[in-house]
Image (tube, coloured by chain):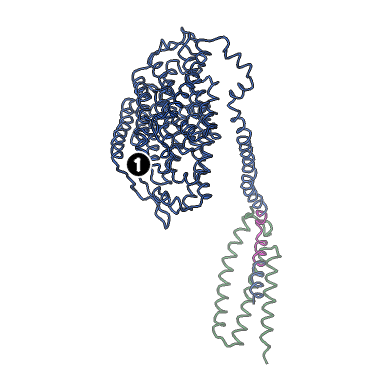
Chain colours: A green, B blue
C-alpha cells in the first residue's frame, strides 16, 4: 500500500518552509544558496507525487525540466556570488549592502 | 473703430488726427442725413447680426432709429467732432497723443452703438463700453496717482449702478421673454405694476451711476483728472446723458410704473440742488463745472420724473452745447495758464484771451438761463411744467437751484477773467489759444445761442412735434403750448432769478462790495461753508462705509489665501518630503530584508485569495 498523497505534500511543504527560513535567517551566502536549492527540490517532490498519484505523465516530465533549470541557475548564481564575495572580501550577507539608500 | 486700431505709437500726429476726426466728421454727415430721413417719417428697426440664438433667447446686434435716436446722433457726432478738432490743439505734443486719439473714437463708437441699440442687451453692452472708455480716458495720464484713483473710482461707482442695471435687464427678459425694444414696449401693459416698478427702479439705478445722480454722484468731480476735452465730451455732453436717454427710450416701461417716476423726479431735484450748492464754494475751475453738470443732469431727470420727456431731451440737447463749450473754454484757460486750475490764482484774463472770454461768457449766460440763449428755453420749460402741474414746492426748489447756478457760473467768470491778475505776470504769460481750439469754441457758442429756438414757442416748437411720436404717454400733450400769460410770467420770474444770481456774484467778486465780502460771510455761515466745501461729507461717508470695509475684507481674504491656501500647498510638499525620508529606511541594502518582504507579501496575497471565498 502506498502512503497517502497528503504525506508527500506535507513533506514537500515542510521542506519548502525549512528552505524559506534558511534563506531569510542565515548569513552565509552559500547556505542561503543551498536553501534556495532546497526549496526548488521541495517543489520537485510535490510535482512528482502529483504525477504518480494522479497519473499525469506530464508532471514527471516537468520534474526533469525543473532539475535542469535548477542546475543552470546554480551555476550562474555561484558565479555571481563568487565574484561579489571576492570583491567585498566577505561571505556575510549582512555586509553586502551596496543597494542601501 | 478704424481710428482706434490705426492710432498706434509712432504714427505722425497729423495723420492720426485726420483719420480720427475724419471718421467722426463722416459720422456727423451721416447723422444729418438720418435726421432728415427720420424727419420725413422713416423709422428703422433692423437686426444687423444675430449673435446668440438658443431656444427662447435670441440676441442680435441691431439698430433702432427714430426721432429720439436721430437727435442723439446729431448731438453725439457733432460734439465729438468739435472735441476731436479741439484736441488737436490741446493734446499737441503730449506723448500719449496716439492713445488719446485711439480712445476718443472708441468712445464715440460705443456711445453711438448705445444710442442706436434696438435691444436691452446691446444697450447694456455698450453702456459698459462707454464706462470702460471713461475709465481709460480719465486715467489717461496714468503716471499721476490721483488720475488713476479717479479712474478707478469712476469705474467702481459706475459698476454699482450697472449692477442694478444688469438685474433690471435680466428681470425684463424674465418678465417679457425678449429683450428687443419693439417687443418689450408692445407688451409693457401686460406686466404687473410691481414688476414694472422693480424693473424700472433697477434700470434707474444704472442711470444714477452713469449720469452721476445722488447718491452715486461722487465720481464725476474726481473725473476731472482727465484731459479737459474728455471732460467736455464724456462728462458733459454724451456719456452722462446716456442715463437720461435710457429713461426716455424706455418711457413705456416707466410710464407704467409711476412710483419709479416719482423717485426719479425726487432724485433729480435733490441732485440739482446738491450740485448747485457745492459748486458755489469750489475753487477748481473744472470742479465747478463738474458740479454744474451734476446739477443740470438732475434737472433732466427731474423733468423725466414729472413726465416732461421732451423737455428733458431738449435740455439735454442745449446743455450738451453750452456745457461742452464751458469745459473747452476752461481747457483753453488751463492751456494758457500752464495747467493751473485754481481760480484763486487767476484773474484778469479778459485782456489776454478775448476769444475764450467771449465764448465762455456766452456759455455761462446760457447755463444761467438768460434769454434768449439756449439754456433759458429748456430750463424754463422744465420749471414751467412743474409749476403748471401745481407742484409748487418743486418749482420753488428748482428755481432756487437756478439762482445758485447763475451765481456760481458768474463767480467762475469773475474770478477767472475779470478784475486784476492774481498771478505773477512775469512768470506766467497767458496767451490766446490757437484757432484749432478757438474755432470749436465759437461754433459751440453760436449753437448755445440758437439751439434753444428749436423749442420755441414753449411746448409747441419744432422739437416738440418732432419728438411727439416717441413719447406717447408723456405729459406734454396735456398742456397747451405757446406764449400764454402764465408762461410769460414764469419766463419773467426765471429771468429775474438768473439776473439776481449774476448780480450777486458780480457784487461779491467783481465789484467787491464790502458788505458782501465772501470771507466774512464764510465765517458767519461757517457751518454751511464747511458742509459745502466737504461736499456734504459724502465722500467721507462712503469711505467709512464701503471703502474701509472692503479693504479690510480684502486683507482678511489675502490672509486666508497666503496662510490657508499657500499653507495647504506647501504642506503637501512638506508631507511628501517627510514621508519620503521615512520610507527611505526600507532600503537597507540587506538582501535578506528584501526577501522577507517578498515572503510577507506573498503570504498576504495568498491569504486574501484564500479568504475571499
Q: Relative to the observer, which residue lies in front, B560 or A44?
A: B560
Which secondary structure, mark 1?
A: loop
Q: Relative to the observer, which residue lies in front, B123 or A100?
A: B123
Quadrant of the snapshot with the N terminus of chain B: top left
Residue B524 lies, with reference to residue B564, above or below; the image says above
Q: Which residue is mark 1?
A: B66
Residue B501 in magenta? no
Please state if A59 lies on the left or on the right of B587 as rendered: left
Please state if B435 lies on the left or on the right of A67 as rendered: left
Q: Position of residue B485 (x, y in %)?
A: 43, 28
Q: Relative to the observer, which residue lies in front, B188 or B101?
A: B188
Residue furthest out toward the bottom: A1
Q: Position of residue B241 (x, y in %)?
A: 44, 34
Quadrant of the rendered structure where residue B564 is?
top right
Quadrant of the snapshot with the C terminus of chain B: bottom right
Residue furthest out toward the top: B426
Residue B340 lies, with reference to residue A80, above or below; the image says above
Q: Residue at position x 52%, y 15% from top? A: B344
Residue B587 in magenta? yes
Provide the residue span drawn in magenta.
B583-599
Specify few, some or many for label 1: CA neighbours under 10 Å numbering under 14, 14-19, or 20 or more. many
Amino acid at each position: 500500500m502506498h502512503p497517502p498523497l497528503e504525506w508527500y505534500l506535507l513533506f514537500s511543504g515542510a521542506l519548502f518552509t525549512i528552505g524559506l527560513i534558511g534563506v531569510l535567517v542565515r548569513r552565509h551566502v552559500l547556505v542561503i544558496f543551498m536553501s534556495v536549492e532546497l526549496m526548488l527540490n521541495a517543489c520537485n517532490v510535490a510535482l512528482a507525487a502529483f504525477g504518480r498519484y494522479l497519473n499525469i505523465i506530464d508532471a514527471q516530465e516537468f520534474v526533469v525540466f525543473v532539475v535542469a533549470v535548477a542546475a543552470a541557475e546554480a551555476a550562474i548564481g555561484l558565479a555571481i556570488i563568487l565574484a561579489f564575495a571576492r570583491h567585498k572580501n566577505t561571505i556575510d550577507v549582512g555586509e553586502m549592502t551596496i543597494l542601501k539608500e | 473703430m478704424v481710428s482706434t486700431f490705426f492710432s498706434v505709437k509712432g504714427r505722425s500726429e497729423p495723420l492720426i488726427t485726420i483719420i480720427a476726426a475724419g471718421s467722426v466728421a463722416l459720422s456727423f454727415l451721416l447723422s444729418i442725413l438720418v435726421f432728415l430721413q427720420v424727419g420725413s417719417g422713416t423709422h428703422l428697426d433692423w437686426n444687423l447680426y444675430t449673435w446668440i440664438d438658443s431656444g427662447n433667447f435670441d440676441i442680435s446686434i441691431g439698430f433702432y432709429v427714430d426721432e429720439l435716436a436721430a437727435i442723439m446722433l446729431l448731438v453725439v457726432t457733432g460734439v465729438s467732432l468739435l472735441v476731436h478738432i479741439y484736441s488737436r490743439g490741446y493734446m499737441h505734443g503730449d506723448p500719449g497723443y496716439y492713445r488719446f486719439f485711439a480712445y476718443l473714437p472708441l468712445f464715440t463708437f460705443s456711445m453711438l452703438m448705445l444710442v442706436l441699440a434696438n435691444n436691452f442687451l446691446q444697450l447694456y453692452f455698450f453702456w459698459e463700453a462707454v464706462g470702460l472708455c471713461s475709465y481709460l480716458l480719465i486715467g489717461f495720464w496714468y503716471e499721476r496717482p490721483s488720475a488713476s484713483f479717479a479712474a478707478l473710482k469712476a469705474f467702481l461707482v459706475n459698476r454699482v449702478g450697472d449692477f442694478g442695471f444688469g438685474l433690471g435687464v435680466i428681470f425684463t427678459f424674465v418678465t417679457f421673454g425678449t429683450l428687443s425694444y419693439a417687443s418689450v414696449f408692445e407688451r409693457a401693459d401686460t406686466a404687473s405694476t410691481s414688476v414694472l416698478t422693480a424693473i424700472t427702479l433697477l434700470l434707474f439705478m444704472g442711470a444714477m451711476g452713469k449720469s452721476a445722480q445722488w447718491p452715486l454722484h461722487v465720481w464725476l468731480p474726481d473725473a476731472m483728472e482727465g484731459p479737459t476735452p474728455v471732460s467736455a465730451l464724456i462728462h458733459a455732453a454724451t456719456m452722462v446723458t446716456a442715463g437720461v436717454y435710457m429713461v426716455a427710450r424706455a418711457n413705456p416701461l416707466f410710464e407704467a410704473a409711476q412710483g419709479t417716476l416719482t423717485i426719479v423726479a425726487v432724485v433729480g431735484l435733490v441732485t440739482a440742488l446738491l450740485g448747485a450748492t457745492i459748486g458755489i464754494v469750489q475753487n477748481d475751475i473744472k470742479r465747478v463745472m463738474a458740479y454744474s453738470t451734476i446739477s443740470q443732469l438732475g434737472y433732466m431727470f427731474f423733468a423725466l420724473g414729472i413726465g416732461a420727456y421732451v423737455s428733458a431731451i431738449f435740455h439735454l440737447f442745449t446743455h450738451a452745447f453750452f456745457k461742452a463749450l464751458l469745459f473747452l473754454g476752461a481747457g483753453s484757460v488751463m492751456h494758457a495758464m500752464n495747467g493751473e486750475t485754481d481760480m484763486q490764482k487767476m484773474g484778469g484774463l479778459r485782456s489776454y484771451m478775448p476769444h475764450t472770454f467771449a465764448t465762455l461768457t456766452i456759455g455761462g449766460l446760457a447755463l444761467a438761463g438768460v434769454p434768449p440763449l439756449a439754456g433759458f428755453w429748456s430750463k424754463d420749460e422744465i420749471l414751467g411744467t412743474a409749476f403748471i402741474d401745481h407742484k409748487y414746492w418743486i418749482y420753488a426748489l428748482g428755481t432756487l437751484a437756478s439762482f445758485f447756478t447763475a451765481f456760481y457760473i458768474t463767480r467762475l467768470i469773475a474770478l477767472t477773467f475779470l478784475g486784476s491778475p492774481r498771478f505773477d505776470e512775469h512768470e506766467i504769460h497767458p496767451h490766446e489759444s490757437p484757432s484749432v481750439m478757438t474755432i470749436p469754441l465759437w461754433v459751440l457758442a453760436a449753437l448755445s445761442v440758437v439751439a434753444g429756438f428749436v423749442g420755441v414757442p414753449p411746448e409747441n416748437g419744432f422739437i416738440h412735434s418732432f419728438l411727439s411720436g416717441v413719447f406717447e404717454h408723456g405729459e406734454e400733450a396735456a398742456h397747451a403750448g405757446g406764449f400764454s400769460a402764465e408762461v410769460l410770467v414764469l419766463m419773467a420770474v426765471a429771468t429775474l432769478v438768473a439776473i439776481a444770481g449774476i448780480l450777486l456774484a458780480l457784487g461779491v467778486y467783481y465789484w467787491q462790495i464790502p458788505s458782501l465780502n465772501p470771507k466774512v460771510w464764510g465765517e458767519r455761515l461757517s457751518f454751511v461753508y464747511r458742509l459745502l466745501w466737504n461736499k456734504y461729507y459724502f465722500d467721507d461717508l462712503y469711505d467709512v462705509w464701503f471703502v474701509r470695509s472692503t479693504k479690510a475684507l480684502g486683507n482678511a481674504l489675502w490672509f486666508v489665501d497666503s496662510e490657508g491656501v499657500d499653507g495647504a500647498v506647501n504642506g503637501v510638499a512638506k508631507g511628501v518630503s517627510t514621508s519620503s525620508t521615512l520610507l527611505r529606511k526600507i532600503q537597507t541594502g540587506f538582501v535578506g530584508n528584501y526577501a522577507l518582504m517578498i515572503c510577507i507579501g506573498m503570504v498576504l496575497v495568498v491569504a486574501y485569495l484564500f479568504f475571499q471565498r
